[in-house]
Image (spheres, grey):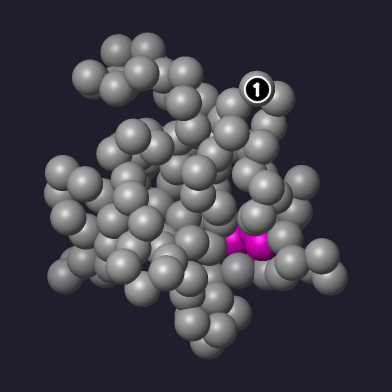
Amino acid sequence: MTQNLPHVSLSPRTGSVGEIRARFHIGQLVRHAAAGFVAVIMDVDPEYAGLAEDTGDFQRHQPFYRLLVEGSDGQVLIYAPEEALSCHQTGGELNPRDREQLFFSDAAGHLAPLGQSIH
């Protein structure tokens, strides 16, 4: 799903908003359990922020992530629920060069995709 959805950026380490706590943070590498691809987290919603009929079999009251995936046709943004993701085997962090190409970082270490402000 690549539609334009509202977003809530979370702190890269604590990852909490209200009662919902995100397991992953912006800039982290994750693996999609069913599809097997590795992606980088670009943004986090505290719960599903799309159309009600688009959640499929997933619960909407969990964090949902915008993931950047490299494919043979270029880069694609995917919207995925937390329950479909796991940590990437490398420890889940981008190398510094890739991180600088994708994100702005403030003095506190909070990340935002280039071109977006940190909330």
Q: Quadrant of residue 100?
A: bottom right
Inspect this view and state whether residue 42 appears: yes
- Which residue is found at the position 50% from the left and 44% from the top? 23
**Viewer-closest of 74 and 37:** 37
Q: Up-down: is 18 above or below 91?
A: above
Q: Quadrant of the N terminus?
A: top left
**Membership of 113 in magenta stretch:** yes
Residue type, label 1: Glu
Q: Which residues are magenta?
A: 111-115
Q: Residues within 10 Å of mark 1 (few under 14, many from 20)?
A: few
Residue shown at 84% from the left, 70% from the top: 107
Q: Residue furthest top?
A: 52
* Residue 116 image point, x, y percent: 67, 56
Is residue 39 one of those drawn in magenta?
A: no
Instruction: Give the total of numbered labels.
Output: 1
Q: Is residue 111 left or right of residue 39?
A: right
Locate residue 7, reporting x and y percent: 59, 37
Label 1 sits on residue? 19
Can residue 69 be spotted in the picture? no
Q: Nearer the viewer, residue 66 or 115?
A: 66
Say if 11 sits above or below 109 in the image.
above
Residue 54 percent coordinates (x, y): 30, 21
Magenta portion: prevailing SS class: strand
The residue shown at (68%, 69%) is 104
In this rendering, would 9 be left or right of 61?
A: right
Q: Is residue 97 left or right of residue 57?
A: right
Give the residue at the far bottom of this rendering. 97
Residue 25 appears at what percent x and percent y? 55, 53
Tell me the residue at 23%/20% (across/down).
56
Side (left or right) of 49 relative to 59: right
Above or below: residue 1 compared with residue 78: above
